[in-house]
Image (cartoon, helix red, strand yellow):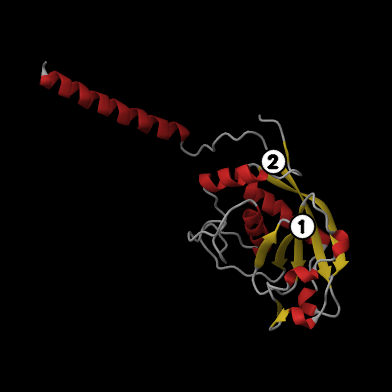
Amino acid sequence: MNTRRVGGRKILWSIALVLLVAIAAILYHGHEPAYDGYWFVPVRVHLLRSQALDAANCRLSPQDVQRIFSRVNQIWAPARINFEIESVVEEEAGDASPTLLEGDRISLASVQRLRPAVSLTNNLIHIYYIHLLAANGVFQNLDALFVQDTAQLEPVPGGIETPLPRVTAHELGHALGLFHRQAVTNLMASGTAGLTLNISEITTARVTVATFPFARKSPAR
């Protein structure tokens, strides 16, 4: 066997393989993966009001909610997931007791006591906006996502300027099975204005949303 000839062929095959990988990278650079249709997820938005407990008294209007979710859906567009507002409910907080407070804010341990039982259902996601919470937002269950209307975020390159859509999109990320990330430009970073999602996170979110009996999927295009 001619070892020089065999060695030369191996080198040529290696070069060819490197070139093919490089060409594929150039052709597909910047292209999003092909996803099988768009997922639509119904959300009931609760604007809690309370004259007795200022921390629970949300300052947002239904028009504000429309603007927030328009931006939320832009953030989640790379994953082909759209959150549809089923209704915006302005209602009195279920519990307005000062015992809910941690300092001047609603404690995370007590926040579910704010939910009025009359507007709860099991066939969609529930998001509650309140005025002051012990965190920008918190996900506790599909029917218990809370966001404070006074949310503040650390700015990052390429991040969002308005906090509420980002905090809302972040908590919805938890509902879709995602965890906190250390990368500050990522949507799932804690307390930053980051917006990005990686392929693994998008895959996880789409696998999770497929388990929601109330979500519907459009045909693939």
Q: Quadrant of the C terminus?
A: top right
| Residue 210 placement, left or right of 201 | right
The secondary structure type at the circle numbered 1 is strand
The secondary structure type at the circle numbered 2 is strand
Instruction: Pick whichever, 11 or 174, lies toward us.
Output: 174
Residue 89 figure quarter = bottom right
Circles 2 and 1: CB distance less than 8 Å? no
Q: Closer to the N terminus: mark 2 or mark 1?
A: 2
Report the amino acid beneath label 2. Answer: Trp
Give how far across and how far down residue 104 sits, in percent.
71, 82
How many marks on residues?
Answer: 2
Q: Which residue is mark 2?
A: 39
Residue 105 figure quarter = bottom right
Report the amino acid beneath label 1. Answer: His
Give how far across and how far down residue 90 sits, in percent.
86, 64
| Residue 95 placement, left or right of 108 | right
Give how far across and how far down residue 80 sits, in percent.
64, 41
Estimate how packed mark 1 is, as few (under 14), some (14 to 19) or many (20 or more) residues with alpha carbons within 10 Å. many
| Residue 25 placement, left or right of 190 | left
Looking at the image, is 113 positioned above or below residue 84? below
Residue 160 figure quarter = bottom right
- The structure residue drawn at horizontal position 62% and vertical position 62%, both measured from the top left corner, is 161
Q: Quadrant of the N terminus?
A: top left
Q: Which residue is mark 1?
A: 126
Estimate how packed mark 2 is, as few (under 14), some (14 to 19) or many (20 or more) residues with alpha carbons within 10 Å. some
Give how far across and how far down residue 139 sits, in percent.
67, 61
Mark 2 against mark 1, which lies toward the viewer?
A: 1
- The structure residue drawn at horizontal position 73% and vertical position 71%, both measured from the top left corner, is 111
Looking at the image, is 132 positioned above or below residue 173? below
Instruction: Pick whichever, 208 or 5, lies toward us.
Output: 208
Looking at the image, is 70 positioned above or below residue 59? above
- The structure residue drawn at horizontal position 76% and vertical position 77%, both measured from the top left corner, is 55
